[in-house]
Image: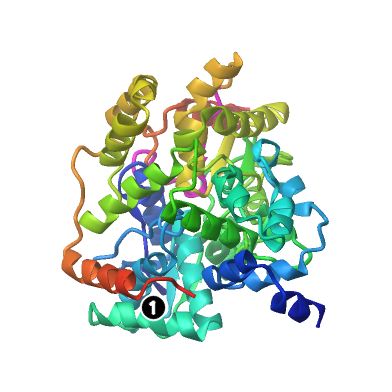
């Protein structure tokens, strides 16, 4: 009942998260115990740990949350999710925050959105991921200097037959693209 | 036993050793793996980061393509396993999302009934469906004397926990114990390898990799076995750079669990994909295993 009451008078940002993420309404059950941040392999590098983010969402601090680095340090390891006593889908909420942040270009100081876009552009085109294409495009446009450091590693992967020079394309890429087009058209998942 | 097989993009090339050894071990155990025809990439974490419905629809296409005569799919890669498992779960739990995903699939003349296909990981399949006696029975080259650190990573054991315990998984440990190996304590066995952080923020990723290598080294492991292409790539291909970054000198081979199973079952090294790892595994394994055999 407490959760229901909170939900009704929740902040607009909380309502937005609930619309964005399946299970997002569980945020109202957060006990502020901090198990999430303590379990996170990158918690120490986050501006705000998930616990704080949930308090900020409830307090409608939208801009501050969307500009923070928190979600970009989430690597989807699900440690917090498996430990959360209130079963909050924390990883999925981090994904939701990433999506909103990308849509509004609110993110700063991270190449993660560029990596994600380069990855899925190749997936949309071929139906499979293409590592050499991903690495070369991503590094060239986002981190040209880091490309030099990647050289020796790329070469040793290549000589062991672990890097293909050409992409693999699925047979029925038209079908996949029709599915993707429909998904874009329908928008938002929840 | 017949299962649909979803190799995933990593197993096609960068982790071909995983694919080769999965197929070789499955063949030996009489597990028939039928590759899903014309499967597509699962999108890893990158589609969920941008567009949830597209992420789900792209993954669901693979579930829809599973041969109607088969009701289980095996996915060795951690990201693929979790994505298939997660989308099937979301479709079962969320009627509206289920309907939207099927609307997307319908645009490609496809349909998927949520819950129709059970998503399995090979670890659980071999451990549960075969068990100790059947596996011991296949051993021709006991792993006696080999110190093995079993690394589970994240997305196979979490969040669902139906492959193994999400906090303290033990199935790999038990299995390699059955095959004669000396399984070492490895307290960080379900910790994160950094995932795609190597591409975004190296200092953070390198620290996570260092912790894993240091822990395996503390317990004097000869080798780390993994179930995930990303874990293998990060620990193996980045090991030299991590050494450079922290002024350490780790030389720990990182191999897939199916490669080591294959060694115990006496399968051919080449057939198991050895030689593709950057930190060579074969010399260490051969040295340890022959030393015991000679003694």
Quarter of the picture holding the N terminus of chain B: bottom left
- Residue B18 horizontal/vertical position (percent): 41, 48
In the displayed structure, would residue A36 be above or below residue B207? Answer: below
Residue at mark 1: chain: B
Report x, y in % for residue B44: 43, 54
Magenta region, residue range: B251-271
Q: Residue at x 72, y 75 (%)?
A: A9
User: In the displayed structure, would residue B190 be above or below residue B211?
Assistant: below
Q: Quadrant of the C terminus of chain B?
A: top right
User: Which is more toward the observer, A85 or B193?
Assistant: A85
Closer to the camera in the image, B52 or B122: B52
Spot occupied by residue B56 in the image (x, y as percentages of width and height) = 41, 69
Find residue B214 and report its image quarter: top right
Mark 1 = which residue? B101
User: What colour scheme was applied to this rendering of the protein?
Assistant: rainbow
Label 1 neighbour load within 10 Å: few <14, some 14-19, many 20+: many
Q: Name the residue rendered at 24%, 39% in the picture.
A: A164
Residue A163 in magenta?
no
Answer with the quarter of the image where residue B93 lies. Answer: bottom right
Residue A93 shown left or right of residue A186 in the figure: right
Viewer can see residue A158? yes
Residue B64 in the figure: left or right of residue B195 = left
Question: Is A109 above or below relative to B173?
Answer: above
Decide whether residue B252 is among the magenta residues. yes
Secondary structure of the residue carrying tag 1 is: helix
Does any portion of residue B263 appear in the rendered image? no
Residue B280 x %, y % = 45, 27
Q: Is residue A31 left or right of residue B6?
A: right
Residue visible at 39% across and 48% down in the picture: A116
Q: Nearer the viewer, residue B245 or B68?
A: B245
């Amino acid at each position: 009942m407490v959760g229901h009451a909170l939900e009704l008078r929740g902040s607009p940002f909380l309502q937005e998260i609930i619309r964005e993420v399946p299970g997002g309404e569980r945020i109202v059950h957060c006990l502020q115990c901090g198990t999430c941040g303590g379990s996170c392999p990158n918690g120490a590098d986050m501006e705000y740990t998930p616990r704080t983010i949930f308090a900020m969402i409830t307090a409608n601090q939208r801009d501050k949350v969307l500009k923070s680095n928190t979600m970009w340090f989430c690597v989807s390891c699900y440690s917090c999710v498996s430990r959360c006593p209130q079963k909050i889908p924390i990883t999925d909420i981090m994904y939701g925050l990433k999506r909103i942040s990308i849509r509004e270009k609110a993110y700063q100081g991270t190449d993660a959105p560029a990596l994600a876009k380069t990855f899925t552009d190749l997936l949309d085109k071929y139906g499979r991921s293409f590592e050499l294409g991903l690495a070369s495009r991503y590094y060239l446009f986002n981190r040209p200097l880091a490309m030099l450091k990647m050289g020796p590693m790329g070469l040793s992967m290549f000589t062991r037959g672990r890097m293909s020079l050409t992409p693999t394309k699925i047979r029925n890429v038209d079908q996949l693209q029709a599915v993707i087009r429909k998904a874009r058209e329908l928008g938002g998942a929840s | 036993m017949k299962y649909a097989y979803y190799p995933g993009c990593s197993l096609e090339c960068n982790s071909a050793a995983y694919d080769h050894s999965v197929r070789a071990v499955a063949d030996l155990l009489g597990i028939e793996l039928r590759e899903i025809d014309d499967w597509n990439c699962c999108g890893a974490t990158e589609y969920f980061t941008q567009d949830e419905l597209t992420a789900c629809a792209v993954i669901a296409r693979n579930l829809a393509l599973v041969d109607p005569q088969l009701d289980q799919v095996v996915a060795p890669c951690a990201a693929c396993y979790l994505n298939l498992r997660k989308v099937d779960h979301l479709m079962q739990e969320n009627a509206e999302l289920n309907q939207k995903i099927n609307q997307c699939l319908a645009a490609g003349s496809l349909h998927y009934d949520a819950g129709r296909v059970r998503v399995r990981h090979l670890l659980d399949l071999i451990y549960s469906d075969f068990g100790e006696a059947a596996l011991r029975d296949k051993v021709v080259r006991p792993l006696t004397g080999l110190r093995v650190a079993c690394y589970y990573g994240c997305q196979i054991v979490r969040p669902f926990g139906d492959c193994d315990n999400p906090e303290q998984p033990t199935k790999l440990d038990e299995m390699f114990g059955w095959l004669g190996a000396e399984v070492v304590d490895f307290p960080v066995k379900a910790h994160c390898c950094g995932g795609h952080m190597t591409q975004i923020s190296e200092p953070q990723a390198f620290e996570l990799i260092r912790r894993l290598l240091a822990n395996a080294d503390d317990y004097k492991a000869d080798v780390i076995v993994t179930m995930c292409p990303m874990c293998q790539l990060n620990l193996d291909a980045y090991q030299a750079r991590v050494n450079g970054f922290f002024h350490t000198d780790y030389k720990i081979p990182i191999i897939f669990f199916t490669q080591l199973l294959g060694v115990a079952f006496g399968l051919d090294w080449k057939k198991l994909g050895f030689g593709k790892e950057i930190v060579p595994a074969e010399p260490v394994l051969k040295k340890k295993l022959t030393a015991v055999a000679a003694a």
